[in-house]
Image (cartoon, rainbow, N blue to C red):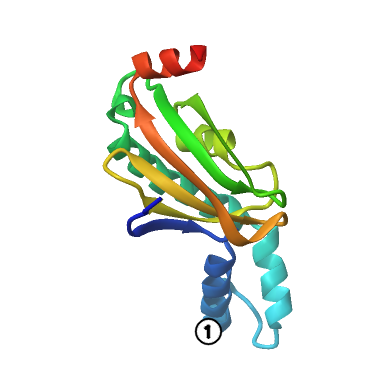
Amino acid sequence: MKVGKKILEWDGGYDALKHELQYRLDNKEEFGYSSCMTKEQIEDEIGESFFFDQEWESFLECLQDILEKKNPDLKQENPIGYWKAEMKNFGWRSQDGGKVFEAHDAEAFLSQILPKCDCHFKIYNYGNRGIAIQNFHHDSNCGREYYYITAIKSSTYYKLEEE
């Protein structure tokens, strides 16, 4: 299946951590660090802060904007988005499958798709009303696992759910 341009990526916040660590190392006085504070000490301090939570929230806000463009139903007063997903090469057994689901926000959307483990993933455009997710995790560390998700109407959702 042909995917478009990469539009978002989640690497567990590690890239952001790398940049934040370098910024703090270069600007120790701004954070009240002594000049002899080590890289490891600063990294530990970042890890104990709300840094990763803030990165995750920022990521979800970006994904929410993308989902609202793909599925205008999410912009309503009581948003419910209906989606159809196809999965290719899932896990170590490289299984294929599919499902329909509802998700009102980015976090609910991801929880319907991704396995419950530490995932790193890239999100691509997939047609006008969809996205493709290339997922990396302990059972698929080469990135062969893909999800192709498209927005559908509620009538299509209920019809497909009955099948």
Outermost residue toward the bottom?
Answer: 36
The answer to whether 77 appears left or right of 118 in the picture is: left
* Figure check: 124 above or below 163: below
Residue at position x 70%, y 88% from top? Answer: 36
Q: With 124 as the anchor, is 53 left or right in this view?
A: right
Query: 9 or 75: which is nearer to us?
Result: 9
**Left or right placement of residue 90 versus residue 146 in this view:** right
- Residue 130, given in percent of the width and then of the height, sits at 35, 41
Q: Three-letter amino acid code at disc 1? A: Asp
**Residue at the image position 30 percent from the left and 45 percent from the top:** 127
Image point 51% across, 77% down: which residue?
23
Residue 30 image offset from top left, x and y in percent: 52, 75
Asked if residue 11 is positioned above or below residue 19 in the image, the reply reads above
Residue with the mark numbered 1:
26
Q: Residues within 10 Å of mark 1 (few under 14, many from 20)?
A: few
- Image coordinates of residue 134 in percent, x first then y, are 51, 54
Query: Is residue 78 at all visible to an observer of this figure?
Result: no
132 or 11: nearer the eye? 132
Up the image or down, 33 lies above or below 125; here it is below
Q: Quadrant of residue 116?
A: top right
Q: Quadrant of residue 136?
A: bottom right
Count of numbered circles on the image = 1
Secondary structure found at label 1 = helix
Q: Which of 128 and 64 is in front in this view?
A: 128
The x and y percentages for residue 5 are 33, 59
Q: Is residue 22 visible?
A: yes
Looking at the picture, tell me which residue is in the foreground, 45 or 78: 78
Q: Residue at 40% across / 25% down in the picture? A: 81
